Amino acid sequence: MNSTKVGPRTVVTLIIVGVLLIVGGFLISQATPLIFPVEASAEARQIDQLFRIALLIGGAIFLLVQGLLAYSVWRFRARAGDLSDGPNIHGNTTLEIVWTAIPAVIVVVLTVLSYSVWTSIQSVKPDEQAVEVQGARFNWAFTYSTPDPRDSSKTLSFKSTELHTYIGRPVRLEMRTQDVIHSFWVPAMRIKQDVIPGRVTEYRFTPVEAAGETYPARYPIQCAELCGAEHGNMIAWVVVHQTEDDYTAWFNQEVDKVLNPPADPVVRGEGILASQVYPCHTCHVLNTETLQWAGNVGPALNGVGDRAAGPRSTATGLSAADYLYQSIHEPNAYLAPGFGPLMPQLNIPECETRSIVAYLCTLTSSGQPACTVELPPECGAGAPPEATPEATAEGTPESSFDPSAPPSGEGASNPTPEATAPAADVTAEATAAP
Ligand code: CUA
């Protein structure tokens, strides 16, 4: 074996190479994050810092391996006319110990650092703002709760299609899915968290002021788990306000909408659908003066009032309004011909469901409503807060629309396992509207 002594020249060379590797790794670790989105949360800074350390180590190893490769190719290349084999070298205990020990130390260091960042992100922060996140094929919705100004023993909640918060306020996300697995990905916050059927997932982040940003700042949320035909359009926004006052102004405006809903259930129902807090628009087709939906999974809703009063009523034995109510609350109790059991139970509160039914009744070819819905006093302006159905991941609230209507099978109190059909089914069902 080789018995070369390590002379001072070799030591100097090794030191120079070591310094060059570290400098090269450092440059890689500083240059790569330049292509990242802004760091809009405290956690983004922690994660990027950890990533820079990993890049520094990884960059140095990359340069070492590629450098040795290039050096070997040049230094030990075959000379003209040399057809002999190279020397058969094996066994170097020192080398084997070194190349086992160094990676082991690196892995342990990275594990400890990663664990400490993870526990810091997941630790409970003071004065957290709790926001419920619901993923459904194919939208994100956020539910905010606050003591009801009319009766402080009760809770008033409202939904938004945007996740609003402000700089410096820690946010705790309580995340659920209505159907299949989705992934809540906010690049600017460095959040990527799956939501899983039957589970509530918690995630925390604290927005920070990002350099050069104008406020309110908007950061995209994208679903990062293939969940069906409209997966690519499952996009929402985080809106970060600059101050608590700006945020409160938005919040109060939303609360006001809940306290003073339109008196006409048709107007109210249309408003709920237009707000897109429920994912109806991502699957159904609808063309009216105010709503243009181009979903490709569910039946078209133009003329649904006529169909509810005609063939659907005959098929189900329900009145038009009861049929429409059932199609929202127990979507799989009766399937429109040509469509599979893909619609999830969306846990839409009672007054909202009735308002949506009132609006759907008006979708007729003649423009004359096929049915009408009276909202009970508890759904009106100034009414006490409505009990929101428990937003469990798979539970289904009891429906109580018309006690005189015939019972409609087991759907009312059972979860709908069909709602978790694999994403591949979606495209198979994407046929034309009836
Ligand atoms: Cu939800 Cu992809």
Image (tube, rainbow, N blue to C red):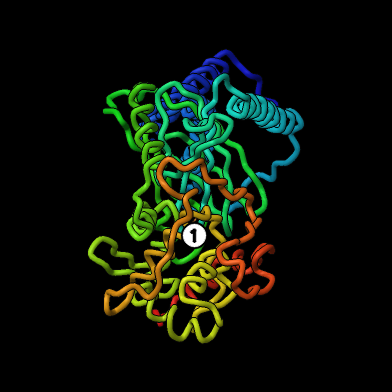
Visible residue check, residue 75: no
Identified at 44% across, 21% down, the residue is 168
**From the viewer's perspective, is 290 left or right of 177?**
left
Visible residue check, residue 334: yes
Q: Which residue is mark 1?
A: 137
Q: Where does the image place residue 100, in percent across and percent down from the top left? A: 71, 32
Q: Where does the image place residue 236, in percent across and percent down from the top left? A: 40, 47
Vertical arrangement, residue 227 with respect to residue 125, above or below: below
Mark 1 lies on a secondary structure that is: loop
Residue 11 lies in quadrant: top right
Between 198 and 377, the one nearer to me in the picture: 377
Q: Where does the image place residue 193, in percent across and percent down from the top left? A: 56, 43
Which quadrant holds the N terminus? Answer: top right
Identified at 58% across, 59% down, the residue is 180
Tell how many labels. Answer: 1
Say which amino acid is labelled 1.
Arg
The furthest residue to the left = 289
The furthest residue to the front = 377
Which quadrant holds the C terminus? Answer: bottom left
Between 247 and 99, the one nearer to me in the picture: 247
Between 371 and 55, the one nearer to me in the picture: 371
Q: Where does the image place residue 369, in percent across and percent down from the top left? A: 34, 72
Identified at 57% across, 13% down, the residue is 8
Judge the density around disc 1: few (<14), some (14-19), many (≥20) Cα neighbours within 10 Å. Answer: many
Identified at 34% across, 77% down, the residue is 303
Q: Is mark 1 within 8 Å of ligand 1?
A: yes
The furthest residue to the top = 8
**From the viewer's perspective, is 35 left or right of 94?**
left
Vertical arrangement, residue 22 with respect to residue 339, above or below: above
**From the viewer's perspective, is 94 left or right of 366?**
right
